[in-house]
Amino acid sequence: MIRKITFVLSMTFVYSLNQHVFADNWTAKNSDPQRLGWMEGFPPPMEKRIMQPDSNFFSFPKMRWTVCHIRELLPTEQINRGLNPSAPFEYELDIDSINALSFRLMETDEVMTWKESLNANFTDGMLILHKGKVVYEYYNGCLTESGKHGAMSMTKSLTGLLAEILVVEGTLDDTALVSSIIPELSESAFGNATVRQVMDMTTGLNYSEDYSDPNADIWNYSAAASPWPKPAEYSGPNGYFEYLQTVKPKGSHGDAFNYMTINTDVLGWIISRLSGQEVTELLSERIWSKMGAELDAYMTVDGIGIPFAGGGLSAGLRDLGRIGQLMLNDGEINGKRLFDPVVVENIKKGANKAAFAKAGYTTLQGGSYKSMWWIFHNNNGAFAARGVHGQTIYIDPTADMVIVRFASFPFAKNADIDPSSLPAYQAVADYLMLKN
């Protein structure tokens, strides 16, 4: 019997996944959006359209087109790159050698090459930087050099970065109670949590982000955040901020890591309240307009125009490479210092490993989560921004390496991709360290 599971992505739309069909039929090749001809023609034929008011534009394989066209389906707010010229990367491509690298999948004897892993993980874009130079670049599916792709929950890491910058600069007290900054949250579960507990997702909340449960709270959150007019019978909260005020407590703050997108949206509210700017505006002012970006980015918004700090970013591949390089260089890029190196030092130290272990991430054992970044605590000191369906900015300080991947893997959880991805990243790091 085919089992259909309905998810709500960490955005404002709903999609369905059919696990049986994926396992038996879909591959990166036969699900390629160009091959399937989505939205081609003048006008596109009915069977090739992906558009509103349909709610299935994130169903597979339509998702493989949607991740590069989100602003055609949802309202967005710009993240301005400014008027200065972009700062191009230097290139020292080594594509053939990297494609030939092999590695063993986690907990198995199966061997895969780097090139094979691209299709296995439904990769739309891949960028590898070594010592600040591009050594590998790849585009596939919906993505081109000039295109933008959904970053999903990698958005959280940029929100966390902005917060950590404000902490180091003294604008934000991470020991303060959330209610002291956002009085509107005083009666919610967030009211007596500290800012740091929100930043590291160790809040105790009565909230479920279990996408397989049709009664999970994420459904109500999605309904509140929907940018479209609410149905006449709808009586719930309108927008992210109103919903956050309804969240009830469960357990104790600080006890365990609990990955919940609503923490990031609270953090976005805190950032905006203190800075007087939308998250999109602050991200543009402090980072995007100063790092030599090639393209504007954008972020989805709710029905009252609040940016989705927890997962709404779409950006170009090389621009997220610049984010990775900025973190690798402790806040400096193109000879410009954008923020204090202590910001990255704080993040790389990580957080409470015991609290993180309670979440049961089998592919990330020994890791932690700090300021919305995933810290691996491996021998290379790697840390990452991660998003559903395979989005990654993987930063390896020991190898002087940044890897950025955009993907449209059929299943949301990175645990399904980590067994072939994390060993692949390590294989590239080992090769680059031996090479130079």
Image: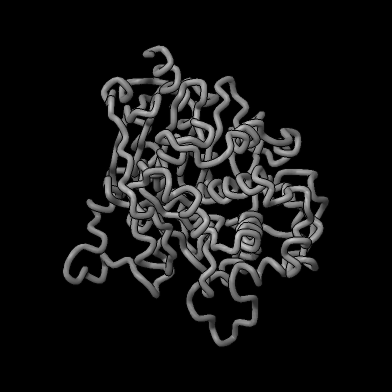
Q: Which of 31 and 242 is in front in this view?
A: 242
Measuring 41% from the left and 23% from the top, which residue is drawn there?
Answer: 428
* Furthest-bottom residue in this view: 232
Say whether residue 43 is left or right of residue 231: left
Q: Is residue 115 visible?
A: no
Residue 50 sits above or below residue 389 on the image: below
Say whether residue 132 is left or right of residue 386: left
Measuring 30% from the left and 47% from the top, which residue is drawn there?
Answer: 85
Measuring 78% from the left and 53% from the top, which residue is drawn there?
Answer: 176
Q: Nearer the viewer, residue 293 or 22?
A: 293
Measuring 68% from the left and 66% from the top, which residue is drawn there?
Answer: 244
Q: In which quarter of the image is the C terminus?
A: top left
* Furthest-left residue in this view: 42
Where is residue 182 drawn, in percent x and y?
72, 64
Residue 207 sits above or below residue 234 on the image: above
Quarter location, residue 237: bottom right
Quarter location, residue 435: top left
The type of colouring in the image is one colour
Residue 90 sits above or below residue 236 on the image: above
Say whether residue 347 is left or right of residue 325: right
**Number of numbered callouts drawn:** 0
Q: Can residue 222 be seen in this view?
A: yes
Where is residue 184 drawn, in percent x and y?
73, 70
Where is residue 190 drawn, in percent x and y?
75, 59
Where is residue 248 drawn, in percent x and y?
77, 64
